[in-house]
Structure formats: structure tokens, C-alpha cells
Amino acid sequence: MIRYVLAILLISTPAVAQDQGLQVWSKIYEVFSHPRCANCHVGPENVPIWSGSSYGPTPRPHGMNINAGMSRIGAESIACSACHGLHNSQVTHGPPGAPEWLLPPPDMQWFSKSSAEICAQIKDPARNGNRTIDKIAGHIAQSELVHWGWAPGPGRESAPYSAAQLVEYVRQWGAAGAPCPTK
């Protein structure tokens, strides 16, 4: 009898954890799909970088028709640092800044992707910078460029929650088995 009850508990526990993991994932997706994050996580070099001050379904292309480029540092002949310094401009919607301003690799695109697509991508070391879930949490906790999303400068809405909360959500999601939604 005790073995039977224990077996039922062991079978039902992952389903509960997975449900909780999916609830936590929805918070992570809320951050990753927010313009503060998705505007930098853009696709291949022929896709324009979207302006960080834009919101909604019709984003505005980056000024001067800047494209991501293969280097991910801006137009191949104009580095991001030509306009983006170590700190935000104090002018509303002025050039944002943070140490090592650059874009993630194209295979880390989140812009216009579904929750299921981003979730699968985050779990795939080939598309997440060869990171485990713990290393992703550590990246969020330690990267000054990632932290810019919560201090984007005058005139820009910050990412939801806080960096510390997002780190905790990623850890909880990982502990639940890192479940992904189907859509």
C-alpha cells in the first residue's frame, strides 16, 4: 500500500512541477518578448535593428538604416559604439548605452517569435550560447548589457519585473524541468 501511494505521488509530482514551470515560463516570455529584450535579439544581418523607443506591432527601424551586420556590432563600417557609449544619453530617447554595446548572434533571435519558439531556443545550447539553464540565469544576473533592459534611459519603458526576479524565474523554470508551451 505504501509503495502504491508513493508511486502515485512520484507520478503526479512532475505534472504539478510542469504546470508550475509553464506558469513561470510565461513570466520569462513576458520579459524576453518585451521590446527591451526583443529589439536587440533580432535575426540575420539583412534584418533591420528596431528602434528601442518603439512599441507595439509596428516597430520603427533603427535610425540611419542600421542593420545588424555579421559582426553584430552594428553596420560593418560603423560600430555601435559610434553612437552608443558606456552610459545612456540623458536626452529623452537619446542613444542608450551600456558596456560592450552589441547584438546577440542571429540564432538568438526573439523578435517576432512565439513563446514556444523562444522556449525551445533557450533550452538549445546550439542556439543559446552553449549555456545550461543555470548559466542562462548567471548570464542574466551578471551581464551589465542585459541589466540595461531595466535601466533603459529617459523615455523608454523598462523590461517587466527585475533582473533578480527574472533570474529566480529562470531557476524555478529549470527546477521544474524547463517545460515549453506548445504554441
Image (cartoon, grey):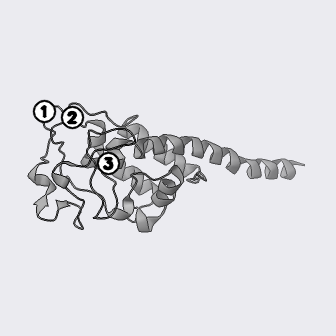
Looking at the image, which is closer to me, 134 or 66? 66
Q: Amino acid at mark 1?
A: Gln
At 55% across and 50% down in the image, what residue appears? 175
Label at residue 153: 2
Task: State the separation of the CA atoms marked 2 and 3.
Answer: 15 Å
Looking at the image, which is closer to me, 167 or 47? 47
Q: Tag 1: Cα neighbours inside 10 Å, few (<14), some, or many (≥20)? A: few
**29, above or below 109, in the image:** above
Q: Nearer the viewer, mark 1 or mark 3?
A: 3
First of labels 2, 3 by sequence position:
3
Element marked by disc 3:
loop
First of labels 1, 3 by sequence position:
3
Labelled pair 1, 2 in contact (Cβ < 8 Å): yes
At 19% across and 56% down in the image, what residue appears? 66
Q: In this view of the protein, can residue 100 be seen by the observer?
A: no
Question: From the viewer's perspective, is 124 left or right of 5?
Answer: left
Question: From the viewer's perspective, is 33 left or right of 91?
Answer: right
Q: Amino acid at mark 2?
A: Gly
Task: State the separation of the CA atoms marked 1 and 2.
Answer: 7 Å
Element marked by disc 2:
loop
Q: Please provide percent x and percent y for residue 124.
A: 47, 64
Label at residue 113: none
> How many labels sit on residues?
3
Residue beneath label 1, please? Answer: 90
Q: In this view of the protein, can residue 176 be seen by the observer?
A: yes
At 39% across and 35% down in the image, what residue appears? 160
First of labels 1, 2 by sequence position:
1
Label at residue 39: 3
Q: Please provide percent x and percent y for residue 102.
A: 22, 56
Task: State the separation of the CA atoms marked 1 and 3.
Answer: 20 Å
